[in-house]
Image (cartoon, helix red, strand yellow):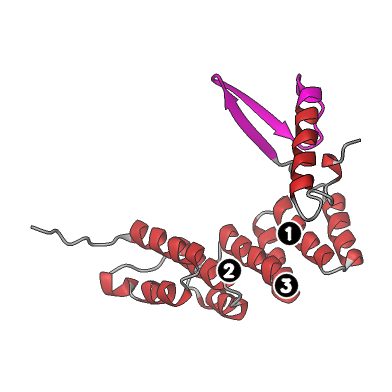
Amino acid sequence: MKEELIPNEITFIAVLAACSHCGLVDQGIKIFNCMASYGIEPGAEHYGCLVDLLGRSGRLGEAKLVIERMPMKPTRSIWGAILNACQSHGDEEIAEKALTELLKLEPDDDGGYMLLSNMYAAEGKWCNSNEIREAMGSKGVKKTAGCSSLVVDGITHSFVAADKKHPRWVEVRSITNFLKGEMDVKADFPLFSMHPSLSSD
């Protein structure tokens, strides 16, 4: 005998997130709209998924409307989702609004500053990009370094770009340069050419 699966709040978050990552925009909107028929009131996480779904597909105006009309205050993740979408699709006006709202919630959020700064840089608006970075400096906000970790024989090794503190840094650098060279040979264009920490100085 087959049991009927009754979705709950978590089920809808998972399905909406899957629709977002797969680009199933219309299906995601239908699923969001049918939550009430299961007696479920959408929460901030569901609205966040809807904003992400619309934003990833470039429907930023609709994503902005969702934020304006939702019955609760937008969370940090909702502003972050639309800010990410603005970077991908190049909408400065919505990006600036999203960053302003994000910084009201988390004034020390370096990620928001960096997204907007990188968006300006990608469009060749270097003055705007520099203004954002200067604003970070004047407010004491520092960019968090990206970090990669690898577990070998139960020992975790962490790596940060251009970090010379690792005990086997010279060896790591040598292998990285070798791999970069191999990839450059096989690629039609030089890889990592814009990232100074990967140059073979």
Q: Residues within 10 Å of mark 2 (few under 14, many from 20)?
A: many
* Circle 1 residue: 115
The circle on residue 90 is 3
Q: Return the residue nearer the eye: 130 or 188.
A: 188
Please say whether residue 168 is one of the residues in the magenta stretch: yes
Can see residue 72? yes
Query: Residue 93: x percent and y percent?
Result: 74, 76
**Which stretch is magenta?**
147-171
Residue drawn at (87%, 37%) of the image: 200
Question: Which is closer to the viewer, label 1 or label 3?
Answer: 3
- Who comes first in sequence, dot 2 or dot 3? 2
Query: Residue 33: x percent and y percent?
Result: 38, 76
Question: Which is closer to the viewer, label 1 or label 2?
Answer: 2
- Judged from the image, the secondary structure of the residue bearing numbered disc 1 is helix
- Residue type of the residue flagged with mark 1: Leu
Please say whether residue 95 is one of the residues in the magenta stretch: no
Residue drawn at (57%, 58%) of the image: 77
Answer with the quarter of the image where residue 199 lies: top right
Can see residue 143? no
* Circle 2 residue: 56
Query: Residue 197: x percent and y percent?
Result: 84, 40
The residue most toward the left is: 1
Q: Residues within 10 Å of mark 3 (few under 14, many from 20)?
A: some
